[in-house]
Amino acid sequence: MKAINSSIYLHRQINKCIVLILCVTSISYSLLAQSPDSLNQVNKRRLKTVIIGSGVAYTGSMIALSSVWYSQYDKEPFHFFNDAHEWKQMDKMGHFYSAFQLSSICSRTLQWSGLPNKKSDLAGTLTSFAIISSIEVLDGFSAGYGASVSDLAANAFGAGFYFGQQLAWKEVRIYPKYSFHRTSYAQQRPETLGNGFFEEVIKDYNGQTYWFSFDIDKFLRFPKWLNLSLGYGAQGMLYANDANNVNQNFMPYRQYFIGIDFDLTAIKSRSKLINSLVYVANMIKLPAPALEISQGKVKGHLFYF
């Protein structure tokens, strides 16, 4: 483990999520804002608000994270820790998902300020990766942790997955989504997997599923509101690595899903509030029929979440 124990490690993931959601760094924004041709098109007041607000939030959060969380460990020369084999890579899926969503949020924020779409997409992608990578840097200098190459790779793939679709199609056609259901595993190790629903949503990898929702009507004639979705999950994990789970008579295994999904972006409204709510809700995979392939068997679910 990066940290002294897996509980501390999972608490660090909560801090990561908070930073990713609340902070938008101004590095890429400032660089692009130097371009005269972009400044002629943007709403300078809005762009200034984005730059200052995101810069203050990011800086304050990083200072707080460094002083409150990392201060309990000694500083060491920068080093790496290999956690690629842990939790059946469910944590890497979380990094991928977070980096994608943050890239999209940053881009939409810049588009709101009037920056051209292409520059907004590039800035959003670079910003997303920069925020997550800066946390890995803090990890790398901490005796309790260590920077993770696999985390950085997942961050890069997530941000790149957003930018690549914008380059290819000028829109998102394959949406990473998240779903969660409560499991019995959290009750057996609540200090690590969560005590109560809101903790379990973040901590219990057994109940998480990450999806790729394909907007089929963007490729061929198909109902606009209906998508095909491929999912990945894992079960049987009280500990990060398989050996510890097996020693406690748990048999961790991977799950693969194929099912239908609903494209909420097909809902169009004149209300900016409703459109914003739809955008956020579309990050979540709604309950729907799905086939599960795991342990050499195929199982049907009428409503899987």
Image (tube, rainbow, N blue to C red):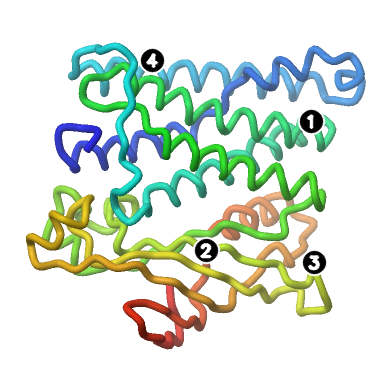
Q: In the image, 207: left or right of 249?
A: right
User: Of the residues under marks 1 and 2, which one precedes in the sequence?
Assistant: 1
The answer for how far apart the CA atoms under marks 1 and 3 are is 23 Å
Q: Which residue matches tag 1?
A: 119
User: Of the residues under marks 1 and 3, which one precedes in the sequence?
Assistant: 1
Mark 1 vs mark 4: in front: 1
> Are dots 1 and 4 in contact, CB under 8 Å?
no
Rendering quarter of residue 83? top left
Compared to 168, does 226 lie above or below? below
Q: In the image, 244: left or right of 218?
A: left
Disc 4 marks a residue whose amino acid type is: Ile
User: Of the residues under marks 4 and 2, which one precedes in the sequence?
Assistant: 4
Q: Which residue matches tag 4?
A: 63
Q: Which residue matches tag 2?
A: 211
> Are dots 3 and 4 in contact, CB under 8 Å?
no
Q: Position of residue 16 (x, y in %)?
A: 39, 35
Q: Residues within 10 Å of mark 4 (few under 14, many from 20)?
A: few
The residue shown at (54%, 78%) is 259
